[in-house]
Image (cartoon, helix red, strand yellow):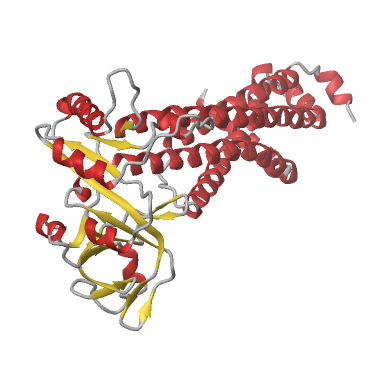
Amino acid sequence: MFSLFRENIRIAIDSIKGQVLRTILTVLIIAIGITSLVGILTLVGALENTISGDFASMGANTFNIQRYEFNTRNNRDRSKINPIISYRNAKEFKKKFSYPFSKTAIHFTGTRNAEVTYENEKTDPEVVVVGINENYLENTGTEIDVGRNFTFFDIENNNHVCLIGPDFKKNLFKNTKPIGKTISIRGVKFKIIGILKSKGATFRNNQDLKVLIPLQLARSIYTLPNINYNINVKVNDKQFLNGSQEEAIITFRNIRRLNPIEENNFGLERSDDLLNRISSITVYLYYAAWIISIITILGSSIALMNIMLVSVTERTREIGVRKALGAKKHTIAGQFFMETVIIGQIGGLIGIILGVLIGGGISAVLNFSFSTPWLAIIAATTISFIIAIVSGLYPALKAAKQDPIESLRYE
C-alpha cells in the first residue's frame, strides 16, 4: 500500500514537471485565492491588535467623563448639544469626587501643531502639547522610560518641567541626552525631567511626538475660549468600578445643576466598553474578509477542475496504456487525484507566504501592530487541501472510467 502511494506521488511529480506552464498557471490561480484570504485576515487582525492595544493601555479599571456619549458623538444627528466640560467643571469634580480607592486625572490638548525649540534647533510645527495633572500617566497607562513623573508639588507649584515623547531623541536630541535639558514652547522654557515609553502611531496620529506640561502652565499658554477638558477616573479594584461610576454621575450632575427629571448633558465611557464595541465591529470585518476570499477561492476551484479535465483529455492514450498494462481504476484515479493535491498544496503554500507578506507590508505602512496570523494560515492550509479534493475528485473519476480500448485509439 505504501509503495503504491509512493509510486503515485512519483508519477504525479513527473507529470507536473512535464507540464510546467500549465502547472504554474494552476498554482497561481490557487495562490491568488489563498493570498486574498490570508492577506485580508492578516490586515484585519493587525488592525484589531492596534486598536485594542491603544484602548487596553488605558486600563480595564478606568472610565472617562466626556462631552458626549460614544453613540451620540458618532451620530450624525446632533440635535442634542451638550456644553463643554470646562476647567471649572473638571476642577470641581476632582474636589468633590471622593470615592474610595480612586484617582482622578484632568488633561486637555493645548495644540497639535506646536514648534519646540532647543538651543539653535527646532522641530517642525507638529508637536502635540498636553496639559496634565499628577494622575494622568497612571490613569492612561502611559509609562516613563527614563527619568521621573510629575509630583503633586510640580503641578501645584506650576514648576516649569515637562515630559517628552521618545521621538524627540531622533531630531532635537540626536547627539545628547534630553534629561535636564531646557526646551522652549511659545517662548516659555521647560526643563525635561522624563522621557515617555514609545506608543507608536495610530492612523497617522503620532503618540511619540508630544510634550506633557503641568495643567496650570498649559492653561496660561493656551487661552482659547471653550476648551474642552478630559476627566479620567481610575479605580484600583475592578469590583468598585460600577459603584464609582454611579458616584461620578451623581457628582457631575450636581456640578451641572441638573434636576432629577433632566437627562445627563455629558457622557460616561468605560475603557472595556470601548474594547467590546471595537471587537463587535471587527467581527463584521472578518465576515467581509471571508466572503471576499470564498468567492475568489470558488473561482480557483473551478479553474483547477477545468485544467485537470483538460489534462485527463490530453493523457487519454497514456491512461489506455496504463490500463492495458494492468492498472486498476483506483490506481488511475489515485494518480490524478495525487497530482491535484500536490498542485493545491504548492498553490496554498505560495498563497500563504504572499498573503502574510502583503498583509504585513500594508500593516507596516499603516503602523498597525502585526502579529503572525496563525488562524489564517491554518484556515488557508485546510482550504487549499479541500480545494484540491473537490477539484480533483471529478477529473480523477473520469480518468478511472476511461475505456482502455477507446483510450488506446485516441489520437
Tell me where residue 359 appears, x and y as whole percent.
52, 45
How far from the left and from the top, in percent, is residue 406?
A: 86, 20
**Residue at the spot 16% in from the left edge and 52% down from the top edge:** 134
Figure check: 330 above or below 266: above
Q: Quadrant of residue 303?
A: top right
Residue 187 horizontal side relative to residue 150, left or right: right
Q: Residue furthest bottom?
A: 120
| Residue 9 position within the rendered picture, expressed as x and y whole percent measured from the top left | 59, 33
Q: Is residue 373 left or right of residue 385?
A: left
Identify the residue at horizontal 66%, vertical 20% (top origin).
393
Give residue 243's position: percent from left, percent from top: 17, 24
Of 88 and 232, nearer the camera is: 88
Q: Quadrant of the C terminus?
A: top right
Between residues 132 and 82, which one lies in front from this camera angle? 82
Q: Report whether residue 41 is seen.
A: yes
**Residue 32, quarter of the rendered image:** top right
Measured along the vertical axis of the image, is residue 169 above or below residue 154? below
Note whether 75 is above or below 187 in the view shown.
Answer: above
Image height of 105 relative to 130, above or below = above
